[in-house]
């Protein structure tokens, strides 16, 4: 971010403002889910306008207990949401009664040249107060030189005899040099019962 310097001795003497950068986060699309849907897809506006796209998901509530919240992408001109990706994931969680805590790598949630939807949260309770919330960053998806990297962090109200908080950290890349221009979110089983997903572009002057 460029600094703006004024030569005047005090703010009261400022006669003109220099060029100020635009706002950092620019809201592009909001998908509001108020009744069950199989997926929430973003199929437009992922292009070279921004180098970084951010998806924020708020209170994603599953219809099915212990469902996993997942995502996948499509390269330009492709369909089916089955791009090849390599990923890693670790988690930390803590039971409400403090009977168990853990920090561990999840081999069951990573992919090595896989084409499945990538899990970024699991064991979500479908009780009335259950959900997961978090974000996904997508870096330079319009590049046709480099693979497209992503990172996510999601916190979950976990399903078990004793409820727990579970935070998952995922990172990886789509192993293609074709532009990624579509992203899909869904649950591993059953519908997304409710929630809000917002897509933002991060102004290039702020990267």
Image: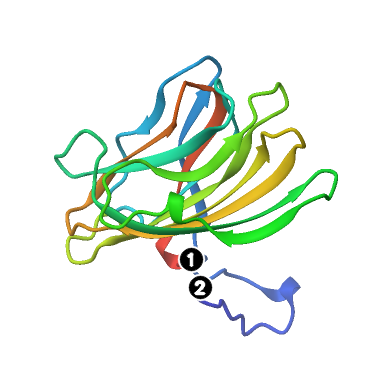
Whichever of labels 2 and 1 marks the residue nearer the N terminus, that label is 2
- Of all residues shown, which one is farthest toward the left? 77
Q: Answer yes or no: is residue 156 visible.
A: yes
Quarter occupied by residue 161: top right
Q: Picture coordinates of residue 173 (x, y %)?
A: 32, 59
| Colouring chosen for the image of the structure | rainbow
Report the residue that reaches farthest toward the top. Answer: 35
Can residue 56 be spotted in the picture?
A: no
- What is the quadrant of residue 15 in the picture? bottom right
Q: Residue furthest right?
A: 97
Q: Position of residue 101 (x, y in %)?
A: 74, 55
The residue where tag 2 is placed is 1
Up/down of 13 relative to 152, above or below = below
Q: CA distance from mark 2 to mark 1?
A: 6 Å
Residue 71 % position (x, y): 40, 41
Q: Are marks 2 and 1 in contact (CB under 8 Å)?
A: yes
Q: Which residue is mark 1?
A: 206
Residue 62 vs residue 181, the one in the foreground: 62
- Relative to 98, 112 lies left or right: left
Q: Residue at x 18, y 44 (%)?
A: 76
Q: Which residue occupies 41% across, 22% down?
A: 38
| Position above or below: 156 against 80 | below
Picture quarter with the C terminus = bottom left
Question: Image point 30% across, 58% down: which residue?
Answer: 112
């Amino acid at each position: 971010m460029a600094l703006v310097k004024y030569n005047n001795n005090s703010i009261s003497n400022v006669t003109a403002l220099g060029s100020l950068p635009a706002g950092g986060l620019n809201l592009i699309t909001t998908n509001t889910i108020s009744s069950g849907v199989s997926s929430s897809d973003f199929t437009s506006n992922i292009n070279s306008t921004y180098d970084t796209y951010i998806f924020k998901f708020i209170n994603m509530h599953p219809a099915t207990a212990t469902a996993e919240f997942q995502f996948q992408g499509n390269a330009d001109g492709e369909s089916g949401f089955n791009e090849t990706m390599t990923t890693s994931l670790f988690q930390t969680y803590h039971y409400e009664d403090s009977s168990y805590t853990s920090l561990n790598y999840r081999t069951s949630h990573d992919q090595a040249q896989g084409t499945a939807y990538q899990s970024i949260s699991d064991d979500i309770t479908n009780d009335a107060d259950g959900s997961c919330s978090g974000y996904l960053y997508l870096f330079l998806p319009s590049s046709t030189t480099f693979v497209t990297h992503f990172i996510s962090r999601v916190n979950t109200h976990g399903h078990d005899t004793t409820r727990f908080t579970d935070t998952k950290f995922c990172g990886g890349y789509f192993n293609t040099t074709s532009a990624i221009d579509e992203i899909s979110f869904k649950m591993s089983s059953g519908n997304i019962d409710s929630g809000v997903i917002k897509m933002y572009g991060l102004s290039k002057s702020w990267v």
